[in-house]
Amino acid sequence: MGMLGASEEEDVSARQADADSQRLLAELPRAFGDYLLFDRIGRGGMAEIFLARTRNSLGGTRRVVVKEVLPELSSELGFARMLIREAKLAARLRHRNVVQVLDLGRESNRLFIAMDYVEGFDLNQLLRQLSKRRLPFPAEFAILVVREVLQALDYAHRARDDHGAPLGLVHRDVSPSNVLISFDGEVRLCDFGIARAMDMDLRRGGDGKQAEDLLDADARAGDAEESRIQRVRVAGKSAYMAPEHARGDMVDARSDLFAAGILLWELCAGRRLYRGTDAEMLELARRGEVPPFPPRGLPASEQLQAILDRALHIDPASRYQAASEMLEDLDRYALEYGLMASQLRFGTFLTDHFADEIVALRRARERAAEDALHARDMLVTEVEPVTLPSDPPVVRRSFPPPSEPPATERRASEQQPAPEVEADAPSGVRRRLIQAGVIAFVAAVAALLYTLAR
């Protein structure tokens, strides 16, 4: 298999991203609410992405990923409402191929989402590393990645709420940066944070024309709410948009399958499907013009081409109608021609080529964060007992301190010998025996006097 080529503009962007990353790393570690951010692992149009640690009430720690939403978006009320609503939907998803959302909140006037940490990198980073080392990406691993993405989409598209009604989730951003790959060979889809429950208003409105009108009204309200999001997310994402998505029309699960088809095309072809500037790629996406699959020496390439033709059809009605349908065809092709790779083999490939370097770097940054925190804690411990001049004096009013005797009296008292303690002083038991004897004697005298009186 070939490698995805990087354009000159992408190289410039990568160098700029590296410079920004070095600047932000100098500011780490940094406390952020309940999280300690210690490594910056990415940046998107919506958020900066950090590797972090959090501690539970019993003292245990775990690594998580914190997406810190950019300030200009955190301050937008419409975006905040949409992000909160859709992150709550994403938190419902529990699947081995979906990254779990753990927390959502606001800290220091910045929205954030905390999610499971996948020890590895995203597909975009993997492809960049392969290109940098001039390593081919085996076809069986390329097909494995897409198969796992399809399993995540099949689960999310069929997800239901607590009452059994379909959530109607659409990912809308199935692209390499949202496909996370662990060094164990796991493939997980993340960032359902911009997903929309397409039919929630439709279910409330009932059937027929009234429901369609409500859905249209919801779409118009959503357009106004998402206008800002589109401006910051289209750059670099238009290359994975279905035609209806690029045109601003309504999207559904079949739009996600179009994006999965682009992933399959690019991973097997070894190059990008759409090339050009953002505006040019957006126009290509609107037209849905897919070039023929280049010959790459794959077995029965005509069968793979048939799968791609159906997944990338410009008309949603002619595409796969469910992720399970595309997954079934891809599984059949991989099984028939010996391209069915296992997670174990994929993990071995990744570990042999990348794990040592990347994991060592992240562990070093984590240790540096721990050292910095320890040094800060030591500094706080040393400063805490010191009473600064600006602090008010502490006055204890319960028991006033005794006045100190003059120096002459103090010297005299120091010269006097300490009083000796009698060795045969009665103990507590002896005192009680003496008291009992006295009482008995008094009682006997009283009895004698009483007898004499009679």
Image (cartoon, grey):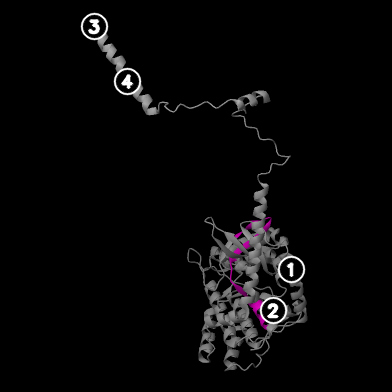
Q: CA distance from mark 2 to mark 4?
A: 108 Å
Residue beneath disc 1: 22
Q: CA distance from mark 2 to mark 1?
A: 28 Å
Residue type, mark 4 in image:
Gly
Secondary structure under the numbered disc 3 in the rendered image? helix
Residue beneath disc 3: 452
Question: Residue 441's spot in the image, x, y percent?
Answer: 30, 16
Question: Residue 9's spot in the image, x, y percent?
Answer: 77, 78
Asked if labels 1 and 2 touch by Cβ distance under 8 angstroms, the answer is no
Q: CA distance from mark 3 to mark 1?
A: 112 Å
In magenta stretch: residue 112: yes
- The local crowd at label 2, few if under 14, some if 14 to 19, many if 20 or more residues have their Cα within 10 Å, is many
Earlier sequence position, callout 2 versus callout 4 = 2
Query: Which is more foreground, mark 2 or mark 4?
Result: 4
Please identify the quadrant where the C terminus is shown.
top left
Over which residues does the magenta segment extend? 104-130
Residue 437 disc label = 4
Query: Does residue 362 sit above or below 405 in this rendering?
Result: below
Q: Nearest the camera: 102 or 264?
A: 102
- The local crowd at label 3, few if under 14, some if 14 to 19, many if 20 or more residues have their Cα within 10 Å, is few
Asked if labels 3 and 2 touch by Cβ distance under 8 angstroms, the answer is no
Residue type, mark 1 in image:
Gln
- The local crowd at label 4, few if under 14, some if 14 to 19, many if 20 or more residues have their Cα within 10 Å, is few
Secondary structure under the numbered disc 2 in the rendered image? helix
